Image (cartoon, rainbow, N blue to C red):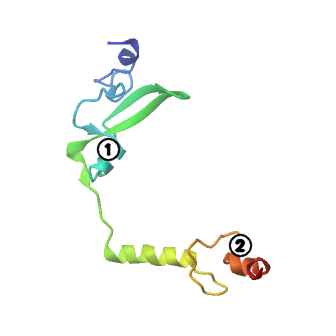
């Protein structure tokens, strides 16, 4: 085992407090949040079960691992929630001055669409 791997290998958690493994050295049954998301799962309120440590830019990097057998299925949005999100995004594209729904989000700095904010440029 290399020195780097030996430095980050603590399966009992005596040195780091929780079981620690090197990059790509975690046993099966553990997954990161991204891996759980890709599998259609979420941590579901469980605490961090282990961690992976590796040397990276700026020092030692950490990735927390969760147990796959305790993970819960991802929740899906209800039709009412999807309608609410769609309405909110449409409201962000609707100009309060002219009432036109634009193909872009209205800049908050202007408070209205570009055609209403700069009418002389639109006429040219």
Label 1 SS: helix
In the picture, measured across the screen, residue 65 lies left or right of residue 102, that is left
Q: Residue at x 28, y 23 (%)?
A: 12
**Residue 5 % position (x, y):** 36, 18
Residue at the (42%, 76%) spot, across then down: 84
Quarter holding the N terminus is top left
In the depicted structure, whether residue 55 falls above or below residue 33: above
Residue 53 location in percent, x, y? 41, 27
Q: Mark 2 highlights which residue?
A: 110
Q: Identify the residue shown where x is 73% and y is 79%.
A: 122
> Residue farthest to the left?
69
10 Å crowding of disc 2: few (<14), some (14-19), many (20+): few
Residue that label 1 marks: 35
Extreme residue toward the bottom, this view: 98
As drawn, the residue found furthest toward the front would be 124
Within 10 Å of the Cα at label 1, are there few (<14), some (14-19), or many (20+) other Cα atoms? some
């Amino acid at each position: 085992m290399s020195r780097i791997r030996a430095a980050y290998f603590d399966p009992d958690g005596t040195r780091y407090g929780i079981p620690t493994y090197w990059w790509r050295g975690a046993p099966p049954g553990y997954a990161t949040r991204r891996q759980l998301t890709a599998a259609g799962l979420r941590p579901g309120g469980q605490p961090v079960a282990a961690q992976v440590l590796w040397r990276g830019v700026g020092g030692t990097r950490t990735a927390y691992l969760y147990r796959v057998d305790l993970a819960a299925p991802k929740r899906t949005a209800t039709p009412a929630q999807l309608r609410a999100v769609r309405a909110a995004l449409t409201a962000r594209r609707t100009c309060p001055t002219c009432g036109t729904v634009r193909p872009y989000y209205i800049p908050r700095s202007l408070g209205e669409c570009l055609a209403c904010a700069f009418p002389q440029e639109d006429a040219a």
